[in-house]
Image: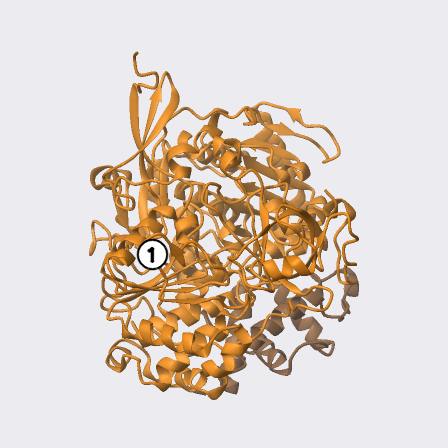
Chain colours: A orange, B brown
Amino acid sequence: MANPIKPDRSVITTCAYCGVGCGFKAQTAGGRIVRMIPWKEGKANHGHSCIKGRFAFDYYQHPDRVRTPMVRDSIDQPWREVGWDEAFRFTARRLQDIQARHGVRSIGAISSSRCTNEEIWLVQKLARAVFGNNNVDNCARICHSPTQFGLSATVGWGAASQHFDSILKADVIMVVGANPTEGHPVFGSLLKRRIRQGAKLIVIDPRRTETVRSPHVEASVHLALRPGTNVAVLDSIAHVIVREGLFDEAFVRARCEWDEFEVWRDLVGSDRYAPEVIGPQAGLDPADIRRAARLYAGGPNSAIYYGLGVTEHSQGSTGVMCLGNLSLACGMLGREGVGVNPLRGQGNVQGGSCLGSWPHVFSGYRFVTDNEVRAGFESDWGVPLDAEPGLRLPNMFDAALTGHFRGMYIMGEDPVQSDPNQSHIIEALRAMDCVIVHDLFLNETAKYAHVFLPGSSSLEKDGTFTSAERRVNRVRKVVEPLAGYQDWEVVVKLMNAMGYPAHYQHAGEILDEIARLSPTYRGMSFALLDEIGSAQWPCDENAPQGTEVLHTERFPRANGRGTFMLTEYVPTRERTSDQLPLLLTTGRILTQYNVGTQTRRTANSRWHPEDVLEISGGDAATRGIRDGDKVWVTSRFGRTQLSARISPRVNPGIVYNPFLHAETRVNVVTSDLSDWATNCPEYKVTAVEVSLVGQAPPERTAAARATPEAVDA
Amino acid sequence: MSTVTDSHAGRDGDTPVMAMSRMITMANQIGDFFAPYPPGRRAEGIRNHLRTYWDPRMREALLRHIDGGGEGLHAHVVEGARLLREITDRKGYYGPPPGKA
């Protein structure tokens, strides 16, 4: 018979699911996508793919997709379908009215790492140039903001130092708080390939992840630390390196600030960070900490890869600094096979991070308080800009509760589901006068919105993504946007409705503006990317085709040197107690993506129909819990119901839950504690109790503020 | 959460931009990070962090809380925050200033 899915057209584009940035040939027949073929020339995937990128594309034509803008005067009213023009007029009038009554700083905008660089750029321009304030943030706030902070502070740029292929020259690979075989599968395969070739693997993770042991691959050292003790353990590794003289003095003298190294050496070298002191606190054998330290320092090429297990803590930024310090001290930067590399969760987290979707910096991490930088933007955009930092995402919600923040444009995000302490977020949204949700589906946050603007998926738009290896990849329109406009066009029309004259013929003109105003993107253009496929920033006259490895000669700091930050361990205030004796930590699985808005609307759901709670055999037995039982998970903040799975992957005292299903509502229980530097939430540590459904759950303590509707499903 | 209440709520008819207890928690966390630095660098590190990251309304609310006694704040956080008024000409930047103080 004839091939029933014989395509009539093929478009090369980039997968939006994770930070690896795989190239695909998206093939269509009769205007519908029939298959995704991994692209052999893709520089991140070289023809490989995972189960999400290859198969989970049908969400784009799911019946739940909204195709018409909708508005309502208040959130207790039903939605009213309107034309685009009326939606823009309604939105502009509402936002301008709020600003007239409550001040310029009373509204803000959130961009998404699922959107293109061009769209992210326009959202921050909307806030800065049109709203006239710096109230712009992006979802990296709740995942990798500590990366930007911690790496900027030590090595100068908050970005991966390497390209992915660099791992093929590593002798020692240290994976911290990440599970690449599930979260970044194509990179995970590359990592496994290198381990099979003989590289040593160190894993620092509370859970026995697939990365720790799988066919052909086993970690040489697994530090299954107690959640919340990252900084103590990393300082203890540094202690061994300092006290045993394993650091690279020549590198530190030649490339770093020696005085700062000495101050740091005194701190981590103190007896209180000895493995024999830290081991018992972190639940580790001191000998294992020493083995990890000697392996890492010994190299000769040692590379660090890390994820949200480092960042999503009250000391998340400090944890990232620990990694920067370690790599500098051991001379593990500036060549292939080494480096410090954040594994980014979403397709364009790096783009959101380096293109100024933050309340305190413009693109390239340049401060809004810097008069010279700001003047450059003012002259290009033709309006005066606010010289003061704006509100961060969690602070926008905090300020909504006091009446100081009343309007919010949210592109491609679902804070009700993805942000911590859900009842607090809902209360804040209810307090606002105008919430605009721009998304593919009526998500949880849309329940509290006044305007819904139907979005376009990455298969329906032109632009670029910047992957976790700083690679700028082209996103190409495969099918027409279902609701008529690409997301960047919607932002332009909203800017126009508010009286700002923005005009772009196509997305490439936005990238041209990015290049004009951002030194590390100076050489980027659609023409270049169409010609050479992709390019890693910095891309400029010195590196016209981009840069694979950073920091080869100098660090991007004022004096060109790397520096050491003092990373004292400060335990989180989230503690276990008699009532809440277990620590809950969270993570990802292979077949689903983040809160699952897209992948749950594909057949991938068959692989993972529900989130489960992993619990050790001992903890289950003492609570009378059998495999598959329904259980309550209760914290200071709320409770939710899950199915228990007795698992050897977690140690006694620890329970684990993936965060991918709305029904799970794990963020009903997560705490409101956050990173000291960036307010990135502490998702990775919550004190909980687990009890069988049917038995009375433990009383929540007086601190619990969960509203009843957020508690019981 | 800290037990400190919003002592300035309602003063002059306007309230702090966000709950004072939350800002005190955040400021003390910043103080915890800079605690191991020598006193001069510690204070300036805290000042720089607040100047660079905090919305001006948050900084103003914190300073007003300090004017009212600074209840709940670590002493070195008060010292660092006060530099916001004394050092007004610097660009924002990360962390403590270079060199030993």
Q: Residue at x 75, y 59 (%)?
A: A704
> Residue A130 location, x and y as percent?
52, 44
Q: Nearer the viewer, residue A65 or A526?
A: A65
Q: Residues within 10 Å of mark 1 (few under 14, many from 20)?
A: some
> Residue A699 location, x and y as percent?
79, 59
Check the image and report above or below for A675 versus A35: below
In the orientation shown, which residue stands out farthest toward the top?
A1
Q: Residue at x 71, y 60 (%)?
A: A636
Q: Quadrant of the C terminus of chain B?
A: bottom left
Quarter of the view holding residue A702: bottom right
Check the image and report above or below for A360 versus A495: below
Chain at numbered mark 1: A
Check the image and report above or below for B1 versus A446: below
Q: Residue at x 44, y 31 (%)?
A: A486
Q: Quadrant of the N terminus of chain B?
A: bottom right
Quarter of the view holding residue A295: bottom left
Q: Can residue A529 be seen?
A: yes
Q: Is residue A62 left or right of residue A172?
A: right
Query: Would you name the residue on which mark 1 appears?
Result: A217
Q: Residue at x 26, y 65 (%)?
A: A171
> Residue A261 location, x and y as percent?
36, 82
Check the image and report above or below for A272 versus A44: below
Q: Nearer the viewer, residue A564 or A275?
A: A275
> Residue A571 location, x and y as percent?
58, 73
Q: Secondary structure at mark 1?
A: strand
The residue type indicated by label 1 comes to Val
